[in-house]
């Protein structure tokens, strides 16, 4: 997006403001002060919402992570015991690992498929508009609705077993009640749901790949694979970086499919970090421990974001 | 057509079929009699079309109430966001005052903070205000968004300062400039923002799950999850409900799909 303000060729705003400023001075409330006051007034409503519903809760989460807190009774200071408790907690380790596995198994295929799809649909191919629309439809669907549909698809007598496994002679599988299959089933659904979103991100990134460069490479006799490797891919690098960070941040916060389809089971096989935090706080009423887990999640996401900034910066000075 | 092109087409069509298949399955199941839900191979066209799955589900469960709640919440949150985000975006783009950069920095930082990291104290805030099981509790915590402020600020930066100065010289007051000049120039950005905020709040699940215990205030996604866990075996009715819940967003998307995709690429941010 173009962010440079367009300028009219005659008198600049500064000059105009300068000419008129003395006439508009009223007591101590200079025009400049009056204006910055208006700026604060305009920002105020949003900032009040932020202070109450975002900043205070975040600060308070850090505070509570050092307390024993049952959500019902007042908190009692216990130092770092919550953090020591989660380090030794197998269920916490499991949920952390499940979250990382979910992110890797879902978003690596999503990013690769979305990139290929975007390249295919960035050509002059006929019907590309319809394809883009179709692939994007799952993105606008609610996660709850999608989870409910896929729960039926994964049913022992559902679509997946009946249409894809039965004809090739594979006996029906219990996708959501088998410990070794449930995580894969949720990954399968998530790939379907998230593909279109990243396709659009890559389509936007491809607008920065100049077509004359591609043409020049083609006339120089480069094959499609070579063009992709030495022109498209390097130019898309910032977009790929951006997309992977978004993918990791979204993926680490996943909650609805596991909550609706498996409740974290069977035997914690799909217990992801967010679901664990929710259960710890609101089912087991251990708010302090849940806060400590939230702090860990916060730092994981902060580190990912900082790495992204660092990579962007180091790229900018290439 | 070159063979490579043909191959590409075949792959794209196969992919599109896979993407659409769950929707076709949902539609087909929603019209089936109960005894035809599970058959191998899948019976795509039911032997008789049971349209009354829709009316029965609507009549026997408080779907209408869930719909009403979802509409009240999503519409109110959208209006609140249009107001707070456009005001704050304008302020951050066109005014300078002490603490401005710090505030904007904090707003951007919260984009990275997972909801789970603030959920317990947020719940306590809402509880101490007496807002559990009220529309206030569902609506106000979502009253502004970092994504929206960022989107609006990026847009406001493109409005020429000269225009604002000219309006000031004509003697227009600051609120008047905002309402009469800035807002009309921001229609595209505002409609993009409205689409996303509406869509996310129509979907919102985690927060309503915590802040409602009374069926009277449950929103559609919560209602569906509840329906699923208590009547999960009646798949035709469940699919009928899911289909009805999906329609509003689907229609909005198909009508405004250009704005959807533009907004997404313009912001490059997923809330």
Image: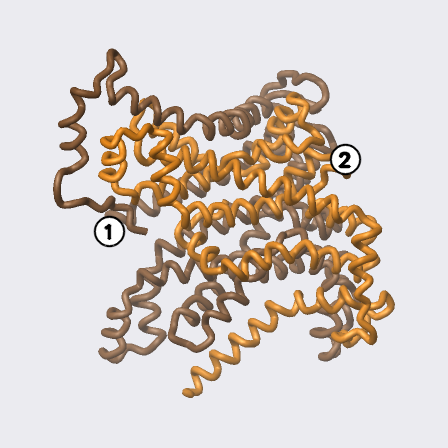
Chain colours: A brown, B orange
Mark 1 Cα shell of 10 Å, populated few (<14), some (14-19), many (≥20): few
Is A188 or B23 nearer to us in this picture? B23
Residue placed under numbered mark 1 in the picture: A318
Q: Is residue A216 above or below residue B150?
A: below
Q: Is residue A94 visible?
A: no
Q: Is residue B189 above or below residue B130?
A: below
Q: Secondary structure at mark 1?
A: loop
* Quarter of the rendering containing residue B126: top right
Q: Is residue B122 above or below residue A121?
A: above
Q: Secondary structure at mark 2?
A: loop
Is A51 or A119 nearer to us in this picture? A51
Is A108 or A159 nearer to us in this picture? A159
Numbered-mark total: 2
Q: Residue at x 43, y 83 (%)?
A: B4
Residue B89 pos. (x, y %): 39, 36
Residue B230 pos. (x, y %): 82, 49
The subunit letter for the residue under badge 1 reads: A
Residue A312 pos. (x, y %): 33, 47
Residue placed under numbered mark 2 in the picture: B214
Could you tell whether B24 is left or right of B58 in the image? left
Q: Residue at x 65, y 48 (%)?
A: A256
The subunit letter for the residue under badge 2 reads: B
Residue A103 pos. (x, y %): 55, 52
């Amino acid at each position: 997006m173009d962010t440079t303000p367009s300028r009219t060729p005659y008198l600049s705003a500064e000059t105009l403001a300068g000419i008129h400023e003395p006439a508009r001075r009223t007591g101590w409330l200079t025009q400049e002060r009056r204006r910055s006051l208006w700026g604060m007034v305009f920002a105020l409503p949003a900032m009040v919402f932020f202070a109450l519903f975002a900043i205070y809760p975040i600060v308070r989460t850090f505070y509570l992570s050092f307390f024993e807190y049952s959500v019902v009774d007042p908190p009692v200071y216990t130092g770092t015991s919550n953090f020591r408790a989660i380090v030794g907690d197998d269920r916490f380790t499991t949920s952390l690992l499940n979250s990382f596995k979910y992110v890797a198994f879902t978003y690596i295929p999503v990013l690769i498929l979305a990139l290929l799809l975007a390249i295919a649909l960035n050509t002059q191919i006929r019907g590309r508009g319809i394809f883009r629309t179709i692939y994007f439809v799952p993105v606008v669907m609610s996660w709850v609705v999608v989870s409910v549909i896929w729960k039926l698809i994964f049913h022992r007598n559902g679509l997946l077993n009946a249409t894809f496994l039965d004809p090739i002679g594979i006996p029906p599988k219990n996708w959501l009640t088998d410990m070794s299959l449930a995580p894969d089933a949720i990954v399968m659904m998530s790939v379907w749901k998230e593909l279109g979103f990243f396709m659009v991100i890559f389509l936007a990134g491809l607008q920065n790949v100049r077509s004359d460069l591609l043409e020049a490479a083609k006339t120089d006799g480069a094959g499609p694979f070579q063009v992709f490797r030495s022109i498209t891919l390097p130019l898309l690098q910032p977009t790929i970086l951006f997309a992977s960070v978004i993918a990791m941040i979204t993926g680490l916060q996943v909650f609805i499919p596991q909550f609706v389809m498996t409740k974290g089971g069977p035997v914690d096989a799909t217990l992801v970090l967010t679901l664990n935090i929710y259960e710890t706080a609101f089912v087991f009423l251990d708010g302090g421990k849940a806060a400590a887990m939230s702090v860990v999640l916060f730092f994981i996401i902060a580190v990912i974001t900082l790495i992204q900034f660092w990579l962007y910066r180091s790229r900018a000075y290439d | 057509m070159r063979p490579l092109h043909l191959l590409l087409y075949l792959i794209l069509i196969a992919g599109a079929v896979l993407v659409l298949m769950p929707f076709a399955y949902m539609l087909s199941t929603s019209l089936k009699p109960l005894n035809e839900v599970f058959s191998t191979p899948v019976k795509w066209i039911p032997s008789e079309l049971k349209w009354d799955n829709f009316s029965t589900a609507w009549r026997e469960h408080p779907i209408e109430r869930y719909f009403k709640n979802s509409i009240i919440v999503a519409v109110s949150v959208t209006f609140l966001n249009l107001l707070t985000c456009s005001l704050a975006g304008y302020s951050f783009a066109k005014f300078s005052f002490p603490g401005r950069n710090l505030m904007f920095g904090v707003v951007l930082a919260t984009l990275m903070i997972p909801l789970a990291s603030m959920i317990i104290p947020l719940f306590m805030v809402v509880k101490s205000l007496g807002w559990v099981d009220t529309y206030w509790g569902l609506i106000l915590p979502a009253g502004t968004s970092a994504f929206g402020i960022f989107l609006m600020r990026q847009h406001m930066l493109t409005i020429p300062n000269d225009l604002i100065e000219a309006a000031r010289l004509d003697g227009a007051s600051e609120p008047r400039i905002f309402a009469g000049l800035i807002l009309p120039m921001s229609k595209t950005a505002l409609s993009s923002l409205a689409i996303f905020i509406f869509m996310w709040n129509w979907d919102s699940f985690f927060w309503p799950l915590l802040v409602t215990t009374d069926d009277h205030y449950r929103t559609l996604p919560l209602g569906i999850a509840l329906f699923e866990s208590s009547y999960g075996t009646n798949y035709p009715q469940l699919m009928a409900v899911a289909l009805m819940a999906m329609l509003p967003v689907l229609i909005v998307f198909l009508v405004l799909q250009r704005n959807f995709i533009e907004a997404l690429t313009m912001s490059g941010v997923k809330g």
